[in-house]
Structure formats: structure tokens, C-alpha cells
């Protein structure tokens, strides 16, 4: 049993294999956050709440002469607005009389087995092997007929808790929900650091660690996408926490649009952490008897550092977020036409690429941008999802069939949520683009964004994508998204603009849900100029995401390192490209590019028709090696052995029973008279003996872990090594 209701229904203790989470109700009905951390017995902790008369922190009216209770100092589980808690709020209502408030008091609870569906939103699922129990705590807004349900999903053995919120208007009048986050908690004690994953296009998800202080530390996106700039996930940890020691908490948002997340210490040294829809782009009409659901947040705690936290997230993503038959299936090694030909191809070029690919052992050809409408560059064509037969030398179907005849699968690029002004779609429906009346829209890559909040737009895209998928044998879709969303204004008849941003995201999700339901065998890779929508929301529909437009192996290592804190390597599409690299101009050995790319969903992105015989032979051998290592790369656990900034980077894959470990090392900086590089693998069975063919050496797991591996003593810059350690039977 994961949910314990104790203290006459006043304390709720969520118990997982290694963590406990406790919530309690105080004498005035405030819902308090009492504990989240290592597993402790289900005993009430209400006495830990410090009650004191604190200046300038007022008391609830009903407290009368008791000045020791203040909503401003209590460790809240979900914070109201305008009613005595002056810290950042979780929720706020605009009432018909013009007042803005939220005073939430506990009303009742319910325990359910299974998960609660969040209509229209992606969320975690459970399975018979790994079930979820749900606790719903209902809070009543003190002066109005509104209830707020806090929904907790507990995955006991996985050490994971999910949170979301359901708000219902039981009254007769419309109310505006002006702000509604998905999760907040007040940690009662201790110093905390916050780690966020920031970046930019072509350099995503670089970890940044800062101490949580009284100044609010917040990340957010107002781009209508989770963004390259800030990933919707954060870690809170003790200052001493590292990969293998210490307390840490991970929070990740199951959402792909604008968001906010952050932490701040209050006057009493408590830390409030928040995550949810960005309030600046949100104001929802709650009509009588209507309910609003927030997106979900996935939370986990590790008392053993970031490695364990990542393992818990990786497992959660693979078993409870990603869906469909491809999650655990071997993905085809692919060649993508983008960096091979960009917009400049014809049928013969694609077929030639396919023939070379087949000869090298590649399994799928992906035709990227440029195959449809009038699309010779990025100025036109988006929205017209009909093939350019002239350019393709015939129908898309005939090309796909020819690729199939070569013995390859066929994949296709689309960018459904966008529209070019120079397109038949725009000429027919200019009002389908997001633009604000009397303002010129922002163009990005010369394109505008379709109004996905409109049902007819979603329907148009659904029909067009179904037509493509029905007319041609397409095995894989790359779903791109190449600009931030602004001019958020819907021209739909009954649109209420405070809702447009979130309704826009719901429109995209409904399209993704319908398509993935209709084409369950399709392998869907999402993308947003690389990693601009690398989030749990997208992962509910696509088991892999193009990790970054940066294919430089050295940058990629860093990007994949940051990405790995929350997301498993099976979600990170990663390709070998040519050198000098198209994004950075850097030259890195082909073997290193291979080692980095195989750490994700693997493929190539280069013009195979221009390779030398030597390069072709190397790639043939790479694919053979990949085929041998693929099971451990796909199903093994991934461990970060170093962090960026040093002379080398190293990481490891380990099979479930620690029978094999695959260790990588890449030299990032060469030095004169270099100090030797030693790598210490993790997770081997200390009692067992492991053989490493590359070193022709056998020793115990204990020795490999403690004494380490000595990498070539004089490695040159960007050179890489791979070591496979296997248990000796
Ligand atoms: C951005 C993607 O990330 C690239 O891989 C490529 O598909 C281009 N868009 C095509 O326009």
C-alpha cells in the first residue's frame, strides 16, 4: 500500500520504496507540506510545523487571539492568493465582483487504484506490473463554490509521484481562473541548490546550478514551446549532492508549451518550489459546472545522488510516458537527407543516397524538408502537404516504393503546425495563421504559426497527414517545429484570448493523439529545430526526439549529457554527420562521431554518395559494431562518469544484471605531456570477474570500479575509446 491515511484522516503519507511524502491538515484547514525525502514510517509530522507570532505575517480571521498561525509562514502544499500568503501563489481566481483571491481549505480525500485521466493532455500511465495508486485531496475555496482537487499518482516501486490539479466551478456564475500551477511544495528546512537546463538553438540543455536564496530563481518559456532556452524540468538538491551521494529531487513537466518553474527561500528559511503553466499566457473561463485540468508534473526523490535520480526518470519515461511498439524495439539505422542535400535534391539523388545507404548497412531513408508544395527554400510551401511530383520525378508513393524495393524503410519530414504566407493554404485561409489584428506578425524562418486552437485547422492537418500516410508506404515521420510562437491571437469566432496559448497546445496534442492511435506502427520522431520541444509531453507520443540541430560530436556530448539527467538515451535521436561540421566547422574523427551518435537513437546525416572508399568501409564496420552493441545501448542503464569542462568525457551503459558494461571516453582537450586518463566504471558486480577485450585484461568488478581503466596514455584531441567489459562465465 502506497497511500496511508492516518491521524483520523488529517495526515496523508505517500510511501514509495525509498521515499516518503507527507501532507497534513492543520486546525484551520490549511493543507501543509510536511515531508518529502527519504523513506520514513507513516507517522504524523504536524508537530514539526513551527508556530510563532511573526511580524507582518497576519493570521486567519477565525484564529481570533491566536497569532501564531499565519498562511504566510506555513509550509503550504498548494498556495492561495491574496489571503495572507505573500509568497508566490499556485492559483488565483478572478470573481464576478472583481475580486482576485484563492483561500483554499481542506474538504475531503479519496484514494483510487490506477491513474486519473487528464482529458486532452498527455500524462503518465500505469501497467499491471507497475501499478499506480491515486490520492485526491479536495480543497474548497473559502468564499466561493469552487473546489480544487490535488491529484497525486504514486508509483510505489518506481519512487515516483505525479501531481496535477483539477478545478471545478460548482456555482451559477462564470469565474476566471487567472493562474493555476500543477505543483508546489514548501520544504521546511535546509539549504538547497537548484539545477536547471538552459541553452539556445544548437546548444540545448546545459546544466546550471545555483543556490536557492531569497531572490526568486525561475526558469520559464513564453515561446509556446517548451524551448531550447529552458527545459521544463529542474532538480533541487543539497549543496553537497553529486552523482552518487546526497538528496535530490527532480521535477519534470509533462507539457510542451509555455511554462514556469522555480524556487525561492522565504523569510523563515523554507523553500517553495513551483511548476506549471506560465501565468502570463493563461486565463481560463470556468463556466458553471466546468472543470479545468492542469498538465502533470512527474517528481522523484533520490537519496543517492543524481545517477539514481536519472535512473528513476529513465525508467519512468520508458515504462510510463513513452507509448507504443517502438519504445523497446530496435530502431532502424537511418540516413536523413537534410545535411546530405538540404533542399537540393531530385528523385535520382534520393535513390542514389538510398542505394549507397543500403550498401553500407543502413535500414531506413528519411526524406527531410523540401519534398512538398512549392518548397525550394524556407520561404514558402508550409501547409501544402502534397508532394512536388516534378521534383520527386513522380508520386511520393512511387518514390517510397522504390526505396522499399532497395530494402530500406521510408521516412518523411513534416512540419504540421506551421504555415508559409506563400502557400495555397495561406491564400485560402489567411485567418488560420496566428496574427494580432492591426499588427504585423513576427516572421521566423519566414513562416507563421497555424492556429492550432481551431478545430478546423486540426482537422485539415489530420486529413492531410492521413492522406499522406494512406497513399504512400511511410514507416516513419519526423514532425518538426521551427519557430517560437508569438502573436498569440485566435481569430476563431468564440475565442477567449486568455485561453488561446493553452488551447493551441491542446490542439497539437489532439492531432498527435489521433494520428498515433490511427497509425500505431508508425515510428514518430518529433523535433523542434533540434531540441526545442524535448519534453515529457512530446514523449507521450514519440519515443524519440531529434536532440539538437548541432551534430558536432563534441557539442553533442555536452548536449546529450545535460539531456540525460531526465531523459533516457533511447529518446535522443543522434546522427553521424560530415566534417568540417556544418554547425561549428570542427573536425572530429569519424570513430568519435560514431561513438557519440550511437549513444542515442542512431543514424547518419551526410551525403553517402561523396564518401571515399575508406570512409565507406569505416561506416560499414560501424554499423556492424552498432548491430552488436544495440541491445545494451537500447536497454542498458546509462551513467554519466564525468561532466563537461574537463579534459575528457566519459559515460557508460550497463546491462540490467551487470553482466556487460560499455564504457566510452572522448578526449576533449589535448595537452603536452598529458596526465593519464583513468575511468572508473559504475555498477559492476564487485564479486564477478570481467574481461575487457580492448585491454586484454580480466579482473574483478571491484578492481575495475576502484582501480579504473587506464585510457591510452597519449590520446590526441577528440580521439575516443570504447571498452566492453563482460562477465567471465
Ligand atoms: C530543423 C530540423 O531540426 C532539421 O533536422 C531539419 O529537419 C530542418 N528543420 C528542415 O527544415
Image (cartoon, rainbow, N blue to C red):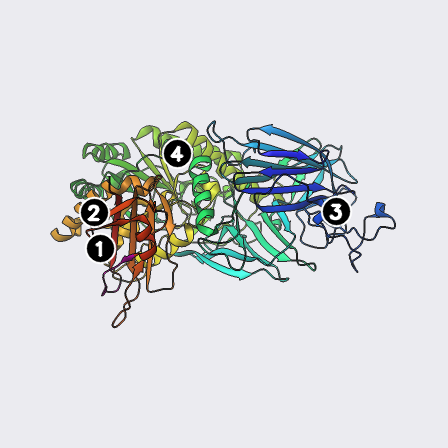
The answer to the question of whether label 2 and label 3 lie on touching residues, with beta carbons closer than 8 A, is no
Residue under pointer 4: 465
Report x, y in % for residue 619. 19, 48
The residue that appears at 59% across and 59% down in the rendered structure is 191
Distance from label 2 to label 3 (Cα)?
A: 62 Å
In the rendering, which numbered label is found on residue 622? 2
Q: Earlier in the sequence, mark 1 or mark 2?
A: 1
User: Can you say whether 138 is above or below 46 in the image?
Assistant: above
Closer to the chain start, of discs 2 and 4, is 4
Secondary structure at badge 3 equals strand
Looking at the image, is mark 4 or mark 3 nearer the viewer? 3
If the image is split into quadrants, where does the C terminus sit?
A: top left
Q: In what element is the residue under mark 4?
A: helix
The residue pinned by badge 3 equals 101
As drawn, the residue found furthest toward the right would be: 65
The region drawn magenta spans: 709-717
Q: Is residue 705 in view?
A: yes
Label 2 crowding class (10 Å Cα cut-off): few <14, some 14-19, many 20+?
Answer: some
The secondary structure type at the circle numbered 1 is helix
User: Marks 2 and 4, Cα distance to the nearest angstrom?
Assistant: 35 Å
Amino acid at each position: 500500500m502506497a497511500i496511508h491515511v492516518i491521524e483520523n484522516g488529517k495526515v496523508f503519507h505517500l510511501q514509495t520504496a525509498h521515499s516518503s511524502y507527507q501532507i497534513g491538515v492543520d486546525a484551520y484547514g490549511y493543507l501543509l507540506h510536511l515531508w518529502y525525502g527519504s523513506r520514513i514510517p507513516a507517522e504524523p509530522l504536524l508537530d514539526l510545523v513551527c508556530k510563532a507570532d511573526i511580524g507582518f505575517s497576519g493570521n486567519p480571521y477565525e484564529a481570533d487571539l491566536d497569532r501564531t498561525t499565519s498562511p504566510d509562514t506555513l509550509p503550504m502544499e498548494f498556495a492561495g492568493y491574496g489571503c495572507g500568503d505573500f509568497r508566490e501563489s499556485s492559483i488565483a481566481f478572478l470573481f464576478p465582483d472583481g475580486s482576485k483571491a484563492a483561500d483554499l481549505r481542506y474538504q475531503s480525500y479519496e484514494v483510487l487504484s490506477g491513474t486519473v485521466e487528464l482529458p486532452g493532455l498527455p500524462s503518465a500511465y500505469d501497467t499491471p506490473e507497475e501499478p499506480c495508486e491515486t490520492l485526491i485531496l479536495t480543497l474548497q475555496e473559502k468564499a466561493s463554490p469552487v473546489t480544487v482537487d490535488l491529484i497525486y499518482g504514486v508509483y510505489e516501486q518506481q519512487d515516483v509521484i505525479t501531481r496535477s490539479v483539477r478545478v471545478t466551478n460548482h456555482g451559477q456564475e462564470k469565474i476566471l481562473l487567472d493562474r493555476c500551477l500543477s505543483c508546489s511544495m514548501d520544504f521546511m528546512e535546509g539549504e538547497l541548490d537548484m539545477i536547471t537546463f538552459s541553452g539556445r538553438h544548437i546548444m540545448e540543455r546545459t546544466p546550471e546550478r545555483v543556490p536557492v536564496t531569497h531572490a526568486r530563481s525561475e526558469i520559464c518559456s513564453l515561446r509556446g514551446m517548451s524551448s531550447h532556452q529552458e527545459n521544463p524540468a529542474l532538480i533541487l538538491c543539497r549543496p553537497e549532492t553529486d552523482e552518487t551521494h546526497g538528496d535530490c529531487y527532480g521535477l519534470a513537466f509533462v507539457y510542451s508549451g509555455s511554462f514556469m518553474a522555480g524556487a525561492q527561500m522565504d523569510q523563515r528559511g523554507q523553500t517553495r518550489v513551483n511548476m506549471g503553466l506560465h501565468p502570463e499566457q493563461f486565463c481560463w473561463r470556468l463556466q458553471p459546472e466546468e472543470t479545468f485540468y492542469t498538465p502533470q508534473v512527474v517528481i522523484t526523490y533520490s537519496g543517492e545522488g543524481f545517477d539514481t535520480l536519472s535512473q528513476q526518470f529513465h525508467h519512468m519515461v520508458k515504462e510510463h510516458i513513452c507509448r507504443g511498439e517502438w519504445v523497446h524495439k530496435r530502431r532502424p539505422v537511418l540516413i536523413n537527407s537534410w545535411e546530405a542535400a538540404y533542399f537540393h535534391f531530385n528523385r535520382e539523388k534520393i535513390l542514389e543516397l538510398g542505394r549507397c545507404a543500403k550498401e553500407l548497412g543502413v535500414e531506413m531513408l528519411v526524406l527531410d524538408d523540401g519534398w512538398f508544395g512549392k518548397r525550394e527554400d524556407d520561404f514558402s510551401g508550409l501547409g501544402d502537404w502534397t508532394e512536388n511530383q516534378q521534383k520527386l520525378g513522380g508520386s511520393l508513393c512511387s518514390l517510397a516504393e522504390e526505396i522499399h524495393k532497395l530494402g530500406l524503410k521510408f521516412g518523411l519530414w513534416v512540419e504540421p503546425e506551421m504555415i508559409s504566407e506563400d502557400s495555397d493554404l495561406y491564400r485560402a485561409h489567411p485567418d488560420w495563421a496566428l496574427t494580432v489584428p492591426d499588427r504585423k506578425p513576427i516572421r521566423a524562418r519566414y513562416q507563421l504559426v497555424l492556429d492550432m486552437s481551431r478545430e478546423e485547422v486540426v482537422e485539415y492537418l489530420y486529413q492531410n497527414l492521413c492522406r499522406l500516410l494512406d497513399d504512400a508506404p511511410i514507416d516513419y515521420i519526423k514532425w518538426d517545429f521551427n519557430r517560437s510562437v508569438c502573436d498569440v491571437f485566435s481569430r476563431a469566432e468564440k475565442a477567449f484570448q486568455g485561453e488561446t496559448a493553452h488551447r493551441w497546445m491542446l490542439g497539437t496534442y489532439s492531432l498527435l493523439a489521433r494520428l498515433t492511435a490511427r497509425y500505431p506502427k508508425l515510428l514518430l520522431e518529433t523535433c523542434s529545430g533540434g531540441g526545442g520541444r524535448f519534453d515529457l509531453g512530446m514523449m507521450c507520443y514519440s519515443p524519440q526526439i531529434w536532440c539538437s540541430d548541432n551534430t558536432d560530436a563534441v557539442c553533442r556530448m555536452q548536449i546529450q549529457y545535460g539531456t540525460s539527467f531526465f531523459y533516457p538515451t533511447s529518446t535522443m535521436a543522434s546522427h553521424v554527420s560530415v566534417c568540417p561540421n556544418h554547425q561549428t566547422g570542427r573536425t572530429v574523427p569519424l570513430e568519435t562521431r560514431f561513438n557519440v551518435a550511437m549513444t542515442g537513437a542512431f543514424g547518419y546525416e551526410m551525403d553517402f554518395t561523396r564518401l571515399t572508399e575508406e570512409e565507406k568501409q569505416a561506416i560499414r564496420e560501424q554499423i556492424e559494431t552498432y548491430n552488436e552493441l544495440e541491445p545494451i545501448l537500447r536497454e542498458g542503464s546509462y551513467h554519466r562518469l564525468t561532466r563537461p569542462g574537463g579534459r575528457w568525457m566519459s559515460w557508460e551503459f550497463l546491462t540490467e544484471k551487470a553482466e556487460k558494461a560499455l564504457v566510452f571516453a572522448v578526449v576533449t582537450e589535448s595537452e603536452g605531456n598529458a596526465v593519464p586518463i583513468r575511468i572508473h566504471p559504475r555498477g559492476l558486480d564487485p564479486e564477478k570477474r570481467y574481461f575487457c577485450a580492448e585491454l586484454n585484461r580480466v579482473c574483478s568488478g571491484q578492481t575495475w570500479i576502484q582501480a579504473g581503466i587506464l585510457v591510452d596514455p597519449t590520446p590526441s584531441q577528440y580521439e575516443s575509446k570504447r571498452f566492453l567489459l563482460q562477465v567471465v562465465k
